[in-house]
């Protein structure tokens, strides 16, 4: 389909300039010979003449198969439309005009109107946002400039969103793995997260609180200082999409709790700063958004969708398949079977305690599985891992925020929190014993049920 742009000036050319796909098959019809000559000098095919005259459109060999972009300027468009449609009856016309109240649908059924204010809003709004982000990037870079070693700190068991965001921040700062260390106080445990680091060759170091003095700047991604039990020195930057926590100081922060993933925020930064996004980084960011939003079904916003769509064509999907399908040990099936045989369902919530678990990643995996049971709105799965009680909470997304319920139910015993539809609590067994006394599986499940339902009622 040929695109025919009709306007008295070269405004439509300026608007379309840079879009080679449109210009290669476009013809410009303008109101005067001087404008036509100016376009011709730029290698643009153009004709000039009276826009209200049928002869101009006959010279252009206009047909009903052409798409016409019409910007009549200050004059009423009816006479121009009549001339166009007399030569090419039924041709589709996109009318760009300032008169937003004009009703043309009845007399011109093939005409679609597009008001100029809307046009500029669509064009300028994202550019204004990018301009603000470029300023923020410049501020971040200035602050980290000159630092010999930077620490990019993630939560204790970093997920794909955190890992990808750390990798993106390193790229934004123009640093390498030596000058910007990605680290955690804990360890990566979930198979798909381990696979992510292995397949994409991402190094995440494990550090101690005593190591913090070795770094000149500290940045946190996908997490905020109150989550850590360790005492942090002054933090330089926090970028996160979780609800904003209270009681901490940082030089720079960007908390967007409306976003489904921190990877979406970092993608916006990279695009605004025109940083070249490698296939490795694209794959990590794409998987970070995909996993944190459950394929955009959990908490995904327009910003997440735009970042997801942008990264889709850049990501290595063969690598993603290797990451998303890690092996499940046979003994995990026995653990699940034992847990499900002692399940308890109360008020739309399914509870099960797995007892001692060899791998902590099995608990959230089973929580995801239990949420698929008919009629279940919440799943709460727990298990003992290396001297700690781990509790994973999942919900269907349209009920109370899982992170808030987790904090209310278990925050007095250990660390607890998370997203709207996914949360976790990690409680030292000694602390659990001192408070709840019993460690027998049935008693542990009963205590978790009581605490959870009480917190759920309080949050309602």
Image (cartoon, helix red, strand yellow):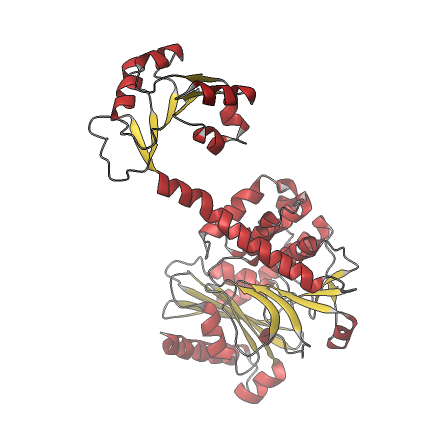
Nearest to the observer: residue 184 or residue 140? 140
Dividing the picture into quarters, in which one does residue 110 lie?
top left
Identify the residue at horizontal 58%, vertical 86% (top origin). 433
Residue 130 in the image: state x and y as whole percent.
54, 50
Q: For the point 41% across and 22% down, which residue is it?
A: 30
Report the front residue among 376 and 112: 112
User: Going 45% across and 50% down the picture, which residue do you hit?
Assistant: 302
**Left or right of residue 172, residue 265 in this image:** left
Is 271 above or below relative to 334?
above
In the image: residue 15, left or right of residue 431: left
Name the one closer to the observer, 81 or 154. 81
Left or right: 239 with respect to 372? right
Number of numbered discs present? 0
Image spot of residue 204 (x, y percent): 72, 61
The residue lying furthest to the left in this view is 106
Residue 257 visible? The answer is: yes
Residue 8 lies, in percent from the top left, at: 38, 26
Q: Quadrant of the C terminus?
A: bottom left
* Quadrant into which the N terminus falls: top left
Taking the image as drawn, is residue 263 in sight? no
| Residue 333 locus on image (x, y percent) | 58, 59
């Amino acid at each position: 389909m040929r695109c025919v742009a009709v306007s008295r000036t070269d405004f439509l050319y300026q608007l379309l300039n840079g879009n080679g796909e449109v210009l290669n098959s476009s013809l410009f019809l303008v109101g005067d010979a001087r404008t036509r000559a100016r376009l011709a000098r730029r290698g643009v095919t153009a004709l000039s003449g009276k826009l209200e005259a049928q002869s101009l459109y006959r010279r252009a060999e206009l047909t009903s198969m052409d798409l016409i972009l019409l910007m009549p300027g200050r004059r009423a468009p009816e006479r121009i439309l009549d001339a166009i449609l007399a030569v090419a009856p039924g041709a589709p016309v996109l009318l760009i005009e300032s008169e937003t109240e004009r009703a043309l649908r009845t007399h011109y059924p093939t005409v679609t109107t597009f008001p100029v204010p809307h046009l500029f809003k669509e064009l300028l709004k994202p550019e204004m946002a990018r301009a603000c982000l470029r300023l923020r990037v410049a501020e971040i870079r200035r602050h980290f400039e000159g630092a010999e070693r930077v620490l990019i700190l993630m939560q204790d068991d970093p997920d794909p969103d955190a890992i990808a965001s750390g990798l993106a921040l390193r790229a934004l700062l123009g640093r390498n793995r030596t000058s910007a260390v990605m680290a955690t106080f804990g360890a990566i445990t979930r198979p798909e997260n381990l696979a992510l680091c292995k397949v994409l060759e991402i190094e995440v170091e494990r550090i101690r609180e005593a190591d913090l003095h070795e770094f000149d700047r500290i940045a946190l991604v996908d997490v905020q200082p109150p989550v850590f039990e360790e005492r942090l020195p002054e933090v330089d930057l926090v970028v996160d999409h979780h609800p904003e926590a209270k009681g901490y100081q940082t030089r720079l922060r960007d908390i967007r709790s409306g976003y489904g993933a921190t990877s979406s925020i970092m993608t916006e930064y990279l695009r605004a700063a025109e940083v070249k996004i490698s296939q490795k980084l694209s794959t990590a960011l794409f998987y970070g958004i995909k996993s944190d939003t459950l394929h955009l079904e959990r908490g995904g916003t327009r910003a997440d969708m735009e970042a997801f769509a942008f990264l889709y064509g850049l990501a290595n999907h063969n690598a993603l398949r290797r990451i998303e399908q890690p092996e499940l040990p046979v003994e995990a099936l026995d653990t699940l079977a034992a847990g499900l045989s002692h399940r308890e369902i109360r008020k739309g919530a399914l509870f099960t305690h797995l007892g001692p678990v060899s791998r902590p990643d099995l608990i959230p995996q089973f929580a995801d599985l239990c949420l698929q049971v008919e009629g279940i709105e919440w799943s709460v799965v727990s298990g003992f891992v290396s001297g700690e009680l781990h509790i994973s909470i999942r919900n269907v997304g349209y009920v109370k925020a899982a992170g808030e319920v987790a904090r209310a139910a278990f925050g007095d015993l250990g660390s607890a929190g998370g997203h709207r539809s996914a949360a976790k609590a990690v409680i030292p067994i000694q602390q659990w014993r001192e408070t709840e006394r019993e460690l027998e599986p049935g008693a542990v499940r009963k205590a978790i049920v009581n605490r959870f339902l009480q917190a759920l009622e309080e949050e309602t």
